[in-house]
Amino acid sequence: MRRGPSGLYEVVPGGVERVRAFIPFPLPPSPPITMGPTLQDQLEQALLALGRLDSAMSFLPQPDLLLYAYARKEAVLSSQVEGTQSSLSDLLLFEMSGAPGVPIQDVVETSRYVAALEHGVQRLREGFPLSSRLLLEMHADLLAHGRGSDKLPGEFRRSQNWIEGSRPGNAHFVPPPPHAVGGAMGNLETFLHRQDLEFGALVRVALAHAQFETIHPFLDGNGRLGRLLISLFLWDSGILSQPILYLSLHFKRHRDEYYRLLDLVRTDGDWEAWLSFFLVGVAETATAAVNTARQLIALADRDRVRVQTGGRSAGSALRVLTALQSRPLLSLRATADRTGLSFPAAAKAMQALEHLGIVDEVTGQRRNRVYAYSSCLKVLNEGLEPL
């Protein structure tokens, strides 16, 4: 439905240029969202896919793996959207104080995404509400180090920003002026927690994400926090029992369409087109995550059978394999710590897994060796290839 612009323009200082900043109307849209047959079917398919994902989590031999790895996979994907080049292995090595294969700034930026996500998860587990204050705290973590650390971490912007272009006067889009940011974010927070609307939490977070991207409340990190908002809200609202759904891959694969539909919301008020794109992305992403879980279950079963044929060393090797199923990149010291084995026993068990072709040593060093559960990493790396 074309409602006309979903906000109003305010002329802001731009030197000799006339610059119009866009201030969105509070949500929900008016007239209300029209949930026709196609949208209703897409909503049902998305909710069914989310239900299957939640169910699949309970069958994983190590549910911690999907939580741990998907958080880091999302960090890599979300950072790739912003132009960094770090891989999942780079990030895992960096977290072990190893040397990544990309510029350190790239992997630092990716690791800060993990820190912001983990902070948000912890605060919500403590009962803190999903709110502007929590987003500010997460923003402080996101920009604590590396690029962007001089862009007011933990604070809403106090100057005008813009999207694309070299200045506001030739920008593709100019978000609200600084004085309007606090009010717009307050309205958004109120909308997120409304329970009196005809549509449920999944539709609500779809609209909220688009609104957040339009407000663009920070000088840097808006895209990453906007994507985190989706994951945390779906978990906090009870749609998912774990924060396991991340849409960065969908947005990365359909980048041009993503931005086109956000523009269409602003210029024409076409929330339905945006909602359709979002719901299809949720269904596809949840289905892909279920397939990943199934591959990991099959891999664990296959490799457990292979290890059990190893005679007297099978017991220790199985303990190491279990550790690798939750942390697919491990040093020998970390292996000993996670399994309770002595260092020599952990080294011998890891060597047994290497002989079976289950793990690969990735440093080429004689000391401080790191081993990768390569088949597991291959499954997790699907979708991380550059486009």
Image (cartoon, rainbow, N blue to C red):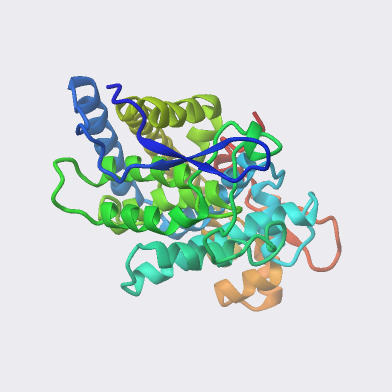
**Residue 214 seen by the camera:** yes
| Residue 145 occupies quadrant | bottom right
Q: Nearer the viewer, residue 384 or 323?
A: 384
Compared across the picture, whether 309 is left or right of 329 comes to left
Q: Quadrant of the C terminus?
A: top right
Residue depicted at x 21% and y 25%: 41
Q: Residue 232: percent from the left, percent from the top?
A: 38, 55
Q: How many marks?
A: 0
Q: Residue 209: percent from the left, percent from the top?
A: 40, 44
| Residue 379 occupies quadrant | top right
Q: Nearer the viewer, residue 371 or 319?
A: 371
Q: Residue 135: percent from the left, percent from the top?
A: 45, 62
Q: Work out whether 145 lies above or below 295.
A: below
Compared across the picture, whether 132 is left or right of 221 comes to left
Q: Residue 349: percent from the left, percent from the top?
A: 65, 64
Q: Quadrant of the N terminus?
A: top left
**Residue 352 seen by the camera:** no
Residue depicted at x 46% and y 29%: 263
Residue depicted at x 84% and y 68%: 367
Compared across the picture, whether 205 is left or right of 379 comes to left
Q: Nearer the viewer, residue 1 or 12?
A: 12
Q: Nearer the viewer, residue 101 or 339?
A: 101
Q: Work out whether 274 lies above or below 227.
A: above
Residue depicted at x 35% and y 75%: 126
Residue that protrudes farthest toward the front in the picture: 16
